[in-house]
Image: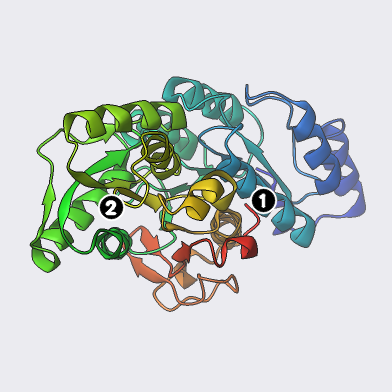
Amino acid sequence: MKKRLLSILLCTAMVATTLAGCSGSGGSAETSAEANAETDASGGGEEAASDGGYTIATVVKDMSDPWNLRHEEGVKEFAEETGLNCFVKGPSKTDSAEQIQVIENLIEQDIDALCVTPIDPEACKPVLAKAREKGIVVLTHEAEGFDECDFDLEAFNNQEYGEAMMDELAAAMGEEGKYVTMVAFLSSTSHNQWMDAAVAHQKEAYPNMELIPEERIECEDNMDTAYNKAKEIIKKYPDIKGFLGASSYDPPGAAKAIDELGMTGQIYAVGTGVPSVSGPYLESGSNPCVLCWDPALSGKAMLKLAVMILDGEKDQIKTGLDLGIEGYENLNVNGTNISGNAILVIDKDNMADYQF
């Protein structure tokens, strides 16, 4: 792979021969970003790295989602800062089979590392195992405990995030009343870890709150689905007071239903979200706050870790490591699981500070 070229001093003739063999596949990081904008979600369109640098592909859940577009901003910034060939691919919608095909296409190209936020971590295992067999460094995100990667990076400790979400919902509900939990998919590892931690924290800290005995609501990372399912829950349980959502579409979807049914100020939706989607509901109060992390920064942190591994510095990735990225200055490393301290709580008073 190209990374080996960086560690060997070749004579001028050998360099010329090597570059000739790679001709037609290069291009600067800036050119790569432009080419990426012109290609579709198939995973094609990116070739070898520029001028002997690393090529690192990032695969997100959905190329149309504001969250993932913000992630792409971080990748582009990292490419500009380092001169490396870094780009983003993903499915046209949140579909695991389509995401796996994107990954399949990428690992057939000459890439050095792959950073993936898997829709269904279990389903992604075979293709990411294949990538590793080819010598590609693999980083994952939102897949704590995943065993087909060099490291999984989380923006925070998942238990602490779930507890923080519950604290915010409890405050909105006056620490009493019925609530439900929502996730993108029942197979979403991190989402279910957050909700499990939130429910456990509620039982211990907020005994006057009650989890409605329904199966965890799966909204498929889709605001319309969250909206429709929230309306069904409100009609079935008219005394419900809270929705706790893991996907960034869960709280605004539920909040939209709350507002339309005239229940603003009586029912509250809290959970993961971004101002660009939740803004109207932060203003109305049906969505008192959202919690998140900046996906641009988590994207850059994954790339920084990938470069460290490619540079032969994997042994330096240990607890206390400072990546020089906000929220990732003092990492906690437990085996292949890495967590930062990057939780954000956004409400109507500070949402203008976050342009995503």
Q: Which residue is mark 1?
A: 75
Instruction: State which quarter of the image contains the N terminus.
Output: top right
Q: Is residue 101 above or below residue 269?
A: above
Nearer the observer, 123 or 258: 258
Q: Earlier in the sequence, mark 1 or mark 2?
A: 1
Q: Is residue 224 above or below residue 255?
A: above
Report the disc number at residue 151: none
Left or right of 40? Residue 34 is right
**Labels 1 & 2 near each other (Cβ < 8 A):** no
Which residue lies at the image location 61% right of the left edge and 55% below the top edge?
A: 296
Secondary element under disc 1, as helix, strand or loop, is helix
Amino acid at the residue labelled 1: Val
Amino acid at the residue labelled 2: Trp
Secondary element under disc 2, as helix, strand or loop, is helix
Q: Which residue is mark 2?
A: 194
Which residue lies at the image location 68% right of the left edge and 24% below the top edge?
A: 44
Residue 186 seen by the camera: no
Q: Position of residue 130 (x, y in %)?
A: 44, 31
Q: Position of residue 118 (x, y in %)?
A: 43, 37
Which residue lies at the image location 73% right of the left edge and 56% below the top edge?
A: 77
Nearer the observer, 207 or 339: 207
Nearer the observer, 355 or 325: 355
Q: Residue furthest front?
A: 262
Q: Answer few, some or many: residues within 10 Å of disc 1's Cα (few below 14, many 20 plus, some between 14 and 19).
A: many
Which residue lies at the image location 14% right of the left edge and 58% below the top edge?
A: 200
Q: Is residue 344 above or below residue 68?
A: below
Here the colouring is rainbow
State which quadrant residue 164 falls in. Answer: bottom left
Q: Answer few, some or many: residues within 10 Å of disc 2's Cα (few below 14, many 20 plus, some between 14 and 19).
A: many
Q: How much space separates mark 1 and mark 2, taking CA atoms?
A: 26 Å
